Amino acid sequence: MSFDRFVLAAGAALAAALTAAPAAAQPAPINLKFASFAPEGAASSRQFKRYQEEIKRKTDGRVTIEIFFGGSMGPMPRHYDLVRTAVADMAYFQQGQTPGRFPLTELSHLPYLFPRGPKGVEVSAKVMADLKVRYFAAEHADTRLLWIGFNQASSVWTANKPVRKLEDLQGIRLTASTPTLVALFRDQGVAPIGIPIALVAESLQKGTVDGASTDAFGVFSFKLGSL
């Protein structure tokens, strides 16, 4: 299955805000707004909260970060524009939710580029970091691309229709977050449904989808296990 891209972008306002003040002046406090699609209980959110405390401590309280969890500043497809238009100072989002907007970066969605499992996450993260400044940054105009990471390969998770072999995919409705995944599913007879991960639980409850394509991060972060 394909990988989703996790992107942390910071607006130009952040670079301006961190410019050194004159030696004689008392540094003004800086509060940064950080938009994240992930809910507060997600593993990524816990890590961001650790960064939040570390930055506050290392700047003696002068720099604080206000984190807006769970897409509370807007749906994930809008996160990049929240930064670009200075509504937020930083944003964390999946590039698969903005198909066609970052075509060079989206080449990394292709399957079989990297090993599976934790080793694949490590290798792919290093590759993306090497390419970030020279290639990917140009696609993120008016922002500063801080970090690109990988999740593990997605699995198929279904509510009421077990999938044990390829033939079981025929006709079922699965969420698909990237154009690559949509093409793969259609080839296998799946009806791909493009909805954000935050709406998957509700869609499963209503029966508008039969399952989801995500990794364990998505299952635990958005409480899909009971469904």
Image (cartoon, grey):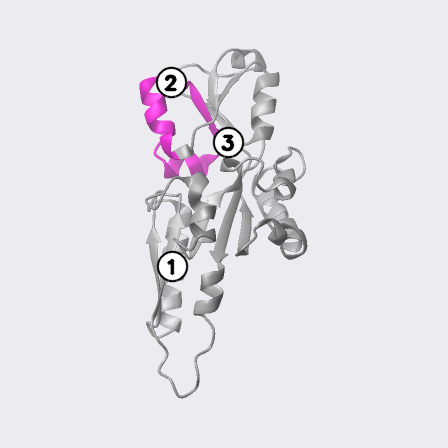
Mark 2 vs 3, N-terminal side? 3
Q: CA distance from mark 1 to mark 3?
A: 28 Å
Residue 75 screen position, x and y as percent: 39, 39
53 magenta-colored: no
Q: Secondary structure at mark 2?
A: loop
- What amino acid is found at the position of numbered circle 2 in the picture? Thr
User: Pointers 2 and 1 in contact (CB under 8 A)?
Assistant: no
Residue at coordinates 52% horizontally, 12% vertically from top-left? Answer: 168
The residue at which mark 1 appears reads as: 50
Q: Which residues are magenta?
A: 198-227
Q: Secondary structure at mark 1?
A: helix
Tell me the quarter of the picture where residue 102 sits: top right
Q: CA distance from mark 2 to mark 1?
A: 37 Å
Q: CA distance from mark 2 to mark 3?
A: 16 Å
The residue at which mark 2 appears reads as: 208
Mark 1 vs 3, N-terminal side? 1
> Looking at the image, which is closer to me, 217 or 38?
38
The image shows residue 65, relative to residue 192, as above or below, that is below
The quarter of the rendered structure image containing the C terminus is: top left
The quarter of the rendered structure image containing the N terminus is: top right
* Foreground disc of the pair 2, 1: 2
